[in-house]
């Protein structure tokens, strides 16, 4: 599926006959998620020339170019795509996304997911887009030259699940600003999981709450800090919970927005928690309290 002169024809045809209200592949902007880059230390013997184009609206076309293809495990392949969006004949945007192509023992494609998400994109794409992804999947599944990923995840054993982790420091003020202005940077810098789509991940930590979305922070020893965000009501709140082996160790409300005051937070690289408040976002933040996540998982 090399990009050649056919691409120009496809783009011109898409300007004339694109379907109305097509569904995009990228997640909703309300669902902040990280698209983690595949490590440069991974190598592949695959000839990186596999590309395809799908329509993303009237006069709009998205080109998916595979830049890294690796066997993830016995029944899945990880692909790093460079995605280029053309409006008319002009390049209007480009970014990278990682996809997991999962298949059965007969090498029939079962589902395709964006890394860090659970939903199968084959269930919500337009038929033409599904066909393009399926055709691409057939090619890479049958390819005998795909290298096997040997990457080791930091703080992870081979039996541990792989999650998208927010790097520290986590400054809510910067988070809010970035995620209002640049959704792609927001996904990369502040990856989160939506609820209930990713309910199973939260429940795997023994948490039965039902937030709007949640963030996983770096572990401290064997303790997992999680920020639960409740943003679907007039009064928004954020809670920090520390868990270990499905057991809640400690909890703290770290932010609240009720229309009268703004209470937000900073979590530093040293796991110190700084709580601020002010009347509105135009005022300077005032530090009210400081806490710290201790090595035993308790917040003091």
Image (spheres, grey):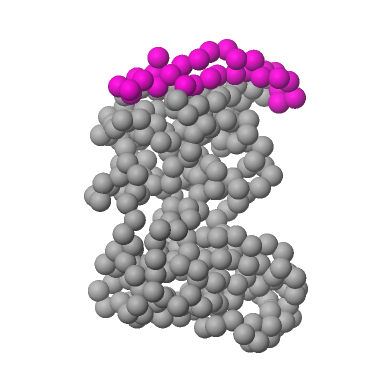
Residue 289 magenta: yes
Image spot of residue 249 (x, y percent): 31, 24
In the image, taking residue 163 as reference, residue 229 lies left or right, namely: right
Residue 293 magenta: yes
- Residue 214: tell me if it is visible: no
Q: Quadrant of residue 39?
A: bottom left
Image spot of residue 61 (x, y percent): 66, 72
- Residue 11: tell me if it is visible: yes
165 above or below 114? above
In the image, taking residue 138 as reference, residue 204 lies left or right, namely: left
**Location of the C terminus (image quadrant):** top left
Query: Which residue is at 25% across, 34% downward?
Result: 245
Q: Quadrant of residue 95?
A: bottom right
In the rendered structure, which segment of residues is drawn in magenta? 272-300
Image spot of residue 124 (x, y percent): 50, 65
Query: Which residue is at 60% across, 51% downward?
Result: 184
């Amino acid at each position: 599926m090399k990009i050649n002169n056919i691409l120009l024809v496809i783009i011109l045809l898409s300007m004339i006959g694109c379907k109305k209200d097509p569904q995009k592949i990228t997640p909703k902007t309300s669902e902040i998620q990280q698209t983690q880059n595949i490590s440069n230390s991974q190598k592949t013997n695959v000839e990186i020339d596999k590309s395809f184009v799908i329509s993303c609206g009237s006069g709009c076309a998205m080109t998916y170019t595979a830049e890294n293809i690796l066997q993830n495990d016995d029944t899945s392949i990880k692909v790093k795509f460079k995605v280029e969006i053309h409006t008319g004949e002009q390049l209007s945007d480009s970014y990278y996304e990682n996809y997991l192509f999962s298949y059965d023992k007969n090498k029939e494609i079962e589902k395709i997911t964006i890394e860090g998400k659970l939903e199968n994109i084959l269930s919500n794409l337009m038929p033409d887009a599904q066909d393009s992804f399926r055709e691409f999947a057939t090619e890479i599944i049958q390819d005998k030259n795909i290298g096997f990923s040997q990457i080791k995840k930091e703080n992870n054993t081979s039996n541990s699940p792989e999650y998208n982790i927010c790097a520290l420091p986590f400054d809510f003020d910067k988070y809010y600003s970035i995620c209002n202005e640049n959704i792609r940077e927001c996904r990369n810098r502040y990856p989160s999981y939506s609820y209930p789509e990713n309910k199973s991940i939260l429940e795997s930590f023994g948490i039965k709450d039902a937030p709007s979305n949640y963030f996983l922070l770096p572990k401290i020893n064997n303790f997992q800090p999680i920020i639960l965000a409740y943003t679907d009501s007039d009064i928004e709140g954020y809670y920090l919970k520390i868990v270990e082996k499905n057991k809640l160790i400690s909890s703290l409300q770290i932010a609240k927005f009720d229309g009268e005051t703004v209470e937000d937070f900073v979590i530093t690289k040293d796991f110190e928690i700084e709580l601020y408040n002010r009347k509105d976002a135009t005022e300077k933040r005032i530090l009210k309290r400081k806490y710290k996540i201790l090595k035993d998982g308790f917040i003091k």
